[in-house]
């Protein structure tokens, strides 16, 4: 049994094995319907219990399809339906009950501490579907998409992030840059640069990270341009003020022109004002392929957790 909580806690070898397995499984599904099971039915009879404390579209749908294609089943819970909020049941007791009924647990949570408590008391694998400080399933899927499109290892590419560098997605992307050894440029206002502990960890582990307060300089000669909503689900800020602070960090055609000619644009969605309509719907954008690929990578993450990766 293995957990999938943060990218930094998983070896490069295992992360690459997940990506490779996902590539193989996607190829083998070319002639299958969405809910047809994979030929080997590796998780037949297994139950994935999902719990959502925050809104979800892509994570919810992709994990449901992922476990179904592995011939398992899924049960989705909302905290307002449980004793967890209405009856005052402890997190420890909730964790033990879920472990009794289910075979794996995926949680999208508003608290990193809550995730750690579940990990402490559960006897089944836990997958972090999103927490305030980490979004590992999203970023690993993004790496899969980049390698699929570019047809080369991400190690050989230069990646750029433009926007708020203090959210969960960039934290996981920094961790991934170390594990996969790729160059990462970050373009953001000085006030929103990555947290010191994240950068220190990356430097200690030979990360190749550069931070710019100019998005054009950050994008120069990059193979991939990432961004995310400026106002994230975890933000408790003056939204109008924050949006003004990011007015010069919007991904536009001008910004894309500083990247390589064949650069791609990625966004984990939902989108906001951080990208122009022309870029989002343009030839560089691969956001729909990016969203779909979460199914394939999450299948392999599940297999990793059950120690069934080939």
Image: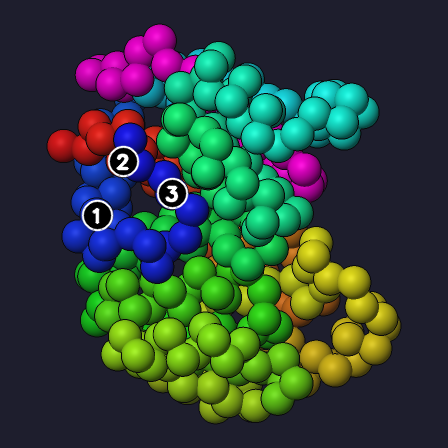
The 10 Å Cα crowd at callout 1, few under 14, some 14 to 19, many 20 or more, is: few
Q: Position of residue 116 (x, y in %)?
A: 51, 45
Badge 3 or badge 2: first in the primary sequence: 3
Residue at the disc numbered 1? 14
Which residue has dot 3 on it?
A: 4
Looking at the image, tell me whether mark 3 or mark 1 is earlier in sequence order: 3
State the separation of the CA atoms marked 3 and 2.
8 Å
Question: Which type of secondary structure does the marked residue at label 2 adopt?
Answer: helix
Q: Residue at x 46, y 38 (%)?
A: 120
Residue designated by label 2 = 304
Q: What segment carries the magenta color? A: 34-63
- The answer to whether residue 257 is above or below residue 41 is below
> Quick one: SS at disc 3?
loop
Cβ atoms under marks 3 and 2 closer than 8 Å: yes
Can residue 263 be seen here?
no
Q: CA distance from mark 3 to mark 1?
A: 11 Å
């Amino acid at each position: 049994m293995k957990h999938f909580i943060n990218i930094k806690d998983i070896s490069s070898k295992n992360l690459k094995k997940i990506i490779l397995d996902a590539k193989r499984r996607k190829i083998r599904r070319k002639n299958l319907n969405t809910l047809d099971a994979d030929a080997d039915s590796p998780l037949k009879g297994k139950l994935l219990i999902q719990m959502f404390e925050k809104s979800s579209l892509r994570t919810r749908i992709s994990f449901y399809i992922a476990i179904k294609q592995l011939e398992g089943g899924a049960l989705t819970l909302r905290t307002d339906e449980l004793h967890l909020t209405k009856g005052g049941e402890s997190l420890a007791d909730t964790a033990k009950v879920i472990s009794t009924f289910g075979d794996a647990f995926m949680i999208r949570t508003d608290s990193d501490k809550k995730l750690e408590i579940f990990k402490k008391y559960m006897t089944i694998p836990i997958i972090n579907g999103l927490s305030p400080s980490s979004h590992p399933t999203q970023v690993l899927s993004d790496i899969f998409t980049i390698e699929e499109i570019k047809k080369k290892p991400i190690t050989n590419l230069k990646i750029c992030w433009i926007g708020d560098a203090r959210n969960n997605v960039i934290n996981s992307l920094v961790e991934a840059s170390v594990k996969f050894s790729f160059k990462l440029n970050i373009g953001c206002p000085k006030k929103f640069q990555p947290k010191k502990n994240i950068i220190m960890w990356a430097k200690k582990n030979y990360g190749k990270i550069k931070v710019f307060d100019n998005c054009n300089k950050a994008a120069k000669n990059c193979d991939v341009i990432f961004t995310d909503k400026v106002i994230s689900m975890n933000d408790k800020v003056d939204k109008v003020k924050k949006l003004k602070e990011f007015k010069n960090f919007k991904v536009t055609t001008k910004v894309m022109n500083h990247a390589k000619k064949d650069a791609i644009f990625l966004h984990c969605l939902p989108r906001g004002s951080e990208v122009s309509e022309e870029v989002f719907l343009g030839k560089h954008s691969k956001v729909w392929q990016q969203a779909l690929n979460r199914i394939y990578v999450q299948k392999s993450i599940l297999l990793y957790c059950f120690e069934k990766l080939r």
